[in-house]
Image (spheres, grey):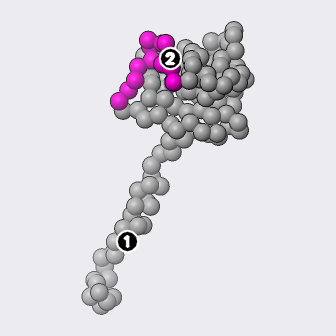
Amino acid sequence: VTSSDTPHDQPVPPPAAARLATAHSQLAPTTLPHVAGLAYGRTALRCTRCDFRVLCFRDRRWLAGIDYMHLRNWMPDAAKVQEELQRENEMDAYACQCLLATVERFGAPPVPQWRRSASLVADPLGD
């Protein structure tokens, strides 16, 4: 196709690679902000009380006596929430904005208000 074969008043569509790049740039990010030394992510669970996604903090446990208002004010800000976590291998700390649980790795959080949602995809947990 030469330039004389294409009418000048019609735009030439971008190549397929450019269309694909544009589509990906319009997608919302799915990862949470990085916090040094803390592996955490969103689960496929949603709380029926506060309607908040449940986060999982890998190799952490909640400190005894964590204040309910701390969760309400700071979830999902992992940098603030990590003040109430302590490192413990093979344990995972879970929380929404109103409830929390610490469970052994690969155990199910024992919170009936947290329901698995088919429309939610869990984030990969990494440092």
Type of amino acid under label 1? Pro
Q: What element does badge 1 sit on?
A: loop
Percent from the top left, x then y, of residue 45? Answer: 45, 24
| Residue 95 sits in quarter | top right
Q: Residue 126 shows which numbered tag?
A: none
From the viewer's side, name the closer residue of 112 and 52: 112
Quarter in which the N terminus is drawn: bottom left
Residue 19 vertical placement versus 30 (above, below): below
Percent from the top left, x then y, of residue 121? Answer: 43, 35
Count residues near mark 1 (Cα–Cα under 10 Å), then give few for <14, some for 14-19, many for 20+: few
Note whether residue 16 is visible. Answer: yes
| Pointer 2 residue | 109
Q: What element does badge 2 sit on?
A: loop
Is 16 on the left-hand or right-hand side of 109?
left
Q: Residue 15 shows which numbered tag?
A: 1
Quarter in which the C terminus is drawn: top right
Query: Which secondary structure dominates the residues rendered in magenta?
Result: loop
Question: Disc 1 vs disc 2: which is toward the camera?
Answer: 2
Do the numbered discs 1 and 2 sit on residues whose CB atoms are within 8 Å? no
Q: Please check the rendered image and state whether residue 117 is part of the magenta-colored stretch, yes or no.
A: yes
- For the point 34% across and 71% down, the residue is 13
- For the point 44% across and 55% down, the residue is 24
From the viewer's side, name the closer residue of 57 and 69: 57
Q: Please check the rendered image and state whether residue 19 is part of the magenta-colored stretch, yes or no.
A: no
What's drawn in magenta, residue-wise?
Answer: 106-118
